[in-house]
Amino acid sequence: MGGALAGLWLPRPARASASEPGRATIGGLEMWDWRDRLPVRRTSPAPEDLHLLTWDPERRYWRYRLRNQPITTAVIHNSGTPADYSLREFVAIDVSQTERTRYPECPYHFVIERDGTINYCVDMSRCTWHSSRQTNDYAVGVCLMGTFMGNVLPTDAQLVSGRRLLLALRREMPFLRFKPHCDMPGADTWCPGDTWPRWRDRILPPPETNQPQPRNREFYSPTGRVARG
């Protein structure tokens, strides 16, 4: 229990500047920590979205609210952008979109770049808009940069890093499930791409055959404590 509590949502390390990432470790896996360092939307949200957000007085913007359900699922996405976009370019596009879905900040908790770099973008305690309205509260978003349609696959480095990240998350949340975005309830999408069946087995960890089943529906909650239902 102590290990899971220590690794789930780490205190932010001191940062050199607002634009430079720190380092974070989750489940023994080290990665870049971009939390509170990426571009955000500065305009007012739509009135119907206010219940999904909370005001951040320090950074002065409307950000994702905290979860109200325990995390049970990690959802795999593709970014739908050219694979050579930088992380900051990708997030800047998402927060500047003018259509109805206007992301206040990066929609994914984790983003894996083409060279395999793992970026922790939004704290896992936050309910980001990455899956569907009925599933975001219990889902963590893991996004691979690129558009994996036709004959386009993630790079070997992305697949290796993706599996390492999913394994690290399962070390913290032993009952975590893994699903592609297209298989989530309420999701009408090809994400993470129509080539998913060709690389699915390279990113998904093997099933935990010796993992005991949760008693009384035990799952790790956003506070790091075990929730029983």
Image: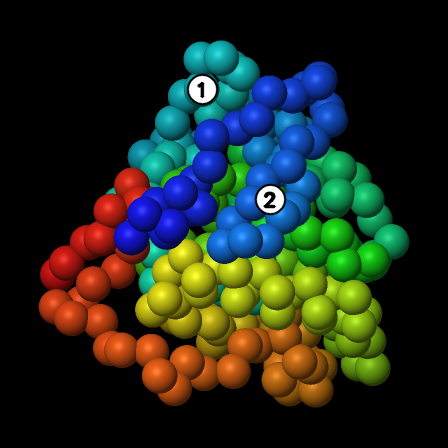
Please report the residue visible at 65 percent of the width from the left and 46 percent of the height from the top: 31
Vertical relation: 144 (above or below) 49: below
Residue in front for this viewpoint, 106 or 229: 229
Please report the residue visible at 35 percent of the width from the left and 83 percent of the height from the top: 210
Q: Residues within 10 Å of mark 1 (few under 14, many from 20)?
A: few
Please report the residue visible at 34 percent of the width from the left and 69 percent of the height from the top: 175
Vertical relation: 87 (above or below) 113: above
Answer yes or no: is residue 130 visible: no
Please give left or right for residue 155 compared with residue 56 in the image: right
Q: Residue furthest right?
A: 84
Please report the residue visible at 64 percent of the width from the left and 28 percent of the height from the top: 37
Residue in front for this viewpoint, 97 or 1: 1
Residue 8 pos. (x, y %): 42, 46
Q: CA distance from mark 1 to mark 2?
A: 19 Å
Label disc, if present, on residue 56 of the rendered structure: 1
Q: Nearer the viewer, mark 1 or mark 2?
A: 2
Residue in front for this viewpoint, 63 or 87: 87
Answer yes or no: is residue 207 visible: yes
Residue 155 pos. (x, y %): 81, 69
Identify residue for label 2.
120
Residue 16 pos. (x, y %): 71, 18
Q: Which sits earlier in the primary sequence, circle 1 or circle 2?
A: 1
Q: Residues within 10 Å of mark 2 (few under 14, many from 20)?
A: many
Type of residue at label 2? Tyr
Res. 143 image quadrant: bottom right
| Secondary element type, mark 2 | strand
Residue 203 pos. (x, y %): 63, 75
